[in-house]
Amino acid sequence: MASPEGAPVPEEQRLGPVLRRQDQVQAGTTDQRLLDSEGPSEWVHTDPWRVMRIQSEFVEGFGALAELGPAVSVFGSARTPRDAKEYDAGVRLGRALVEAGFAVITGGGPGAMEAANKGANEAGGTSVGLGIELPFEQGMNDYVNLGVDFRYFFVRKTCFVKYARGFVVLPGGLGTLDELFEALTLVQTRKVTRFPIVLFGTAYWSGLVDWLRDTLIAEGKASMHDLELFHLSDDVDEAVALVTKEVGI
């Protein structure tokens, strides 16, 4: 086996932590490939390059939020209309969280997210939006005063958890359920320090809670103790009090 320049290529090649042998050995050196201005550009779509993109997203997200202070992540549907009672609850919730000493983190989109950001912004607090690149662009709502856009859901999820002291979950769809069950799993498995999770809107969430108790737990897929991982509330002041009590603010 020889390189394009005719030099022999070794049977074993070490490129940092990567070991290549036989037909996996690459011709040339890493520096050579870096400095060569010619050649194919497909490398920008390879998995190693994506790792660098992922790393950069973590760096940008952590850098932007490192000095945020105590915060609560608020989840809810992007489809919540502005004239809905859930939107009004989101505004009041965002305002009350700021008055209790928290920054408010949302997904930065419209609907319930916009409502919580609006309440936080109008109360003079830090209103954070963690956006995500989607085929159907939503854009950052106008009430975000600190925003970060992500390509990767899992990087965004890490920031939701890392910089929050608790979660308040307004009625929402699949994305909201995704965030909710990830948070519950992290708390249940003790991958994170215990933090409060409040489901806001008992009429909306009661069917899910019934299913957890009557099916999931009844069939031995979870324990009754797991129902203690979250609270149900219809009252903004109570929801904020539950978060404040558990995080010690």
Image (spheres, rainbow, N blue to C red):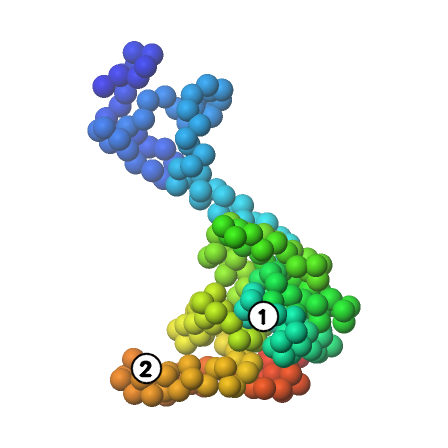
Instruction: Indicate the amino acid at tag 1.
Output: Thr
Mark found first going from the N terminus, 1 or 2: 1
Residue pictured at 70% horizontal, 68% vertical:
118
Q: Residues within 10 Å of mark 1 (few under 14, many from 20)?
A: many
Horizontally, residue 185 falls left or right of residue 217, namely: right
Whether 215 is drawn above or below 41: the answer is below
Q: Position of residue 185 (x, y in %)?
A: 41, 72
The amino acid type of the residue labelled 2 equals: Leu
Going 48% across and 82% down the picture, which residue do you hit?
205
Measure the C-alpha gap from mark 1 to mark 2.
29 Å
Rendered image: mark on residue 163 = none
Residue 242's x, y, as percent?
Answer: 59, 84
Q: Which mark is residue 216?
A: 2
Question: x, y (%) of residue 178?
Answer: 44, 67
Q: Is residue 6 visible?
A: yes
Label 2: state its secondary structure: helix
Which of label 1 and label 2 is nearer to you?
1
Q: Residue at x 31, y 84 (%)?
A: 215
The residue identified by callout 1 is: 80
Q: Which residue appears at 66% of the width and 74% of the height?
A: 83
Quarter of the C terminus within the rendering: bottom right
Asked if the residues shown at circle 1 and circle 2 are in contact, with their CB atoms under 8 angstroms apart, the answer is no
Which quadrant does the N terminus fall into? top left
Q: In the image, is residue 67 above or below residue 120?
A: above
Quarter of the view holding residue 201: bottom right
Quarter residue 42 falls in: top left
Instruction: Give coordinates of residue 203: x percent, y percent.
Output: 51, 86
Badge 1 marks a residue whose secondary structure is loop
